[in-house]
Image: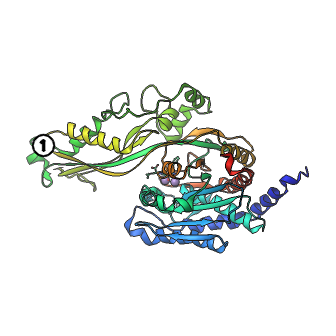
Amino acid sequence: MNDPSTEPIKNIENLLDQKQQAHTEDLLEWLRIASVSSDPQATDRVREAGRWVENRFQAAGLEVQWIETQGHPMVYAETPAVPGAPVALVYGHYDVQPPEPLDHWITPPFQPDIRDGNIYARGATDDKGQVLTHIQAVLRLLETGQPLPLQVKFLIEGEEEVGSENLERMLPELADRLACDVIVISDSSQFAEGQPAITYGLRGIATFELTVQGPQQDLHSGSFGGAVRNPGVALCQLIASMIDDSGRIQLDGFYDDVLPLSEEEREQFAALPFSEADFARSLGVDALAGEEGYTALERKWARPTLDVNGLTCGHQGPGVKTIIPAVASAKLSCRLVPNQDPEKIADALERHVAAHCPEGVRASVERDHGAPGLVASLDSPYVAAAKTALGAAFGKPPVMIREGGSIPIVQKFQETLGADCLLLGWGLADDNAHSPNEKFCLADYHRGIKASAHLWRELGKLKPEQS
Ligand code: BES
Ligand code: MN
Ligand code: MN
């Protein structure tokens, strides 16, 4: 009971309990800054959100660097070096997705509201609330006056939601500063409420805008319909030609580089407590759909997809307007699995569009950002340390999962920094990330802070050469 090795952690747990109110207020403050990275009108607010976190680090006496990029800035901070102990790099993002559609929010997205133990605001779970857990844990540990058992570096960027292209470009010059043994990222979810998870795989992504151009201007559909090809219909036909009835994507070569799921991994997925029927119900759909021959978890974690993210064509206002629209466009994205190359997928999409575009319209593809997928090793001492830390904070050992989302820079980190990756999600599947009424459960926030404190202690016990 009086095991001296647990004394410091008890102290920090007490301190974290005392500071809950202050931690909540910090998050509320950060969430009030509407840092939508994709909105050219929001540049100042994006910077302000960066400054907010920079100030936190500065006030706590960390070594801080404000890093300008060709786009939104990044904030770097580090605690003092600890010889003989590993170096951890916490990565996260302070930018958020656009909040639209605004009329679907119960309370405004940038006026955070606490209801039923949740904070509702854009960015609450993705990623301000989650990355702040590590910042709070480190700042409180420093306040105790005891040295941290390892060096923690932070890189908090403002362009994750738009593809992290500037960070990727600058990574070679930043590599020395970011040198580390393990990268810690909390920007995903628990497997289920109270069931912690270590995520060892993420999907990659390739994004596009497909435009179908018809007549030089909108035409009266009575005078011209039937004689001129409708770009809206042509766009739908083009998209429909990309996926067959069994959910297989028809782009030539699309599956060439896909790493097949091993039987062992399929068994591990199947052993997780997951009900497809409950999952469908929770989303308000009467059936799940996707590639034939795979379970829902397999499809969303380890199989590639092609999706429509947005469609624009013709009259969008109230009432009827009888026209043949001049143009139709679609925002498309493919989720990729490790080993698929976003560039190759973009080439395949362009070839498909060129080969299938009907006569009488012109189709063009504009490439947006892309990023490869990731699988991380599970047998590192860092994973073992994370298991202990999560077990202590959640009272239950974590399960090993993959996730379907993408964090564009992680695979580049792995490659350039040669460090292991720990993806520890504190969110929940129903947090409404990227969606109206995004939330983060306050209990998860405070538990995340504790889990982070445990993690630093466990990682601090390792020697860097153990990796
Ligand atoms: N936090 C997410 C990534 C994520 C989502 C990881 C779900 C695990 C589960 C991240 O902020 C994100 O949304 N990434 C984008 C990247 C894209 C804009 C390049 C994504 O996945 O759409
Ligand atoms: Mn995120
Ligand atoms: Mn996101």
Q: Can residue 301 be seen at all in this image of the molecule?
A: yes
Q: Can residue 111 be seen at all in this image of the molecule?
A: no
- Give SS at disc 1: loop
Looking at the image, residue 49 lies above or below residue 292: below
Give the x, y percent position of residue 71: 41, 66
Residue 466 left/right relative to 219: right
* Residue under label 1: 360
Give the x, y percent position of residue 302: 49, 35
Residue furthest right as drawn: 2
Q: Nearer the viewer, residue 401 or 84?
A: 84
Residue 241 left/right relative to 135: left
In the picture, residue 61 is in which quadrant? bottom right
Looking at the image, residue 240 lies above or below residue 149: above
Q: As shown in the figure, which amino acid type bears the numbered disc 1? A: Gly
Residue 451 left/right relative to 295: right
Residue 323 left/right relative to 388: left
Give the x, y percent position of residue 190: 62, 45
Q: Which residue is at 38% across, 32% downward?
A: 255
Could you classify mark 1 by the number of other residues whose Cα lies within 10 Å: few (under 14), some (14-19), or many (20 or more)? few
Q: Which residue is at 78% across, 58% downward?
A: 13
Q: Nearer the viewer, residue 272 or 24?
A: 272
Q: Which residue is at 62% across, 73% downward?
A: 58
Q: Is mark 1 within 8 Å of ligand 1?
A: no
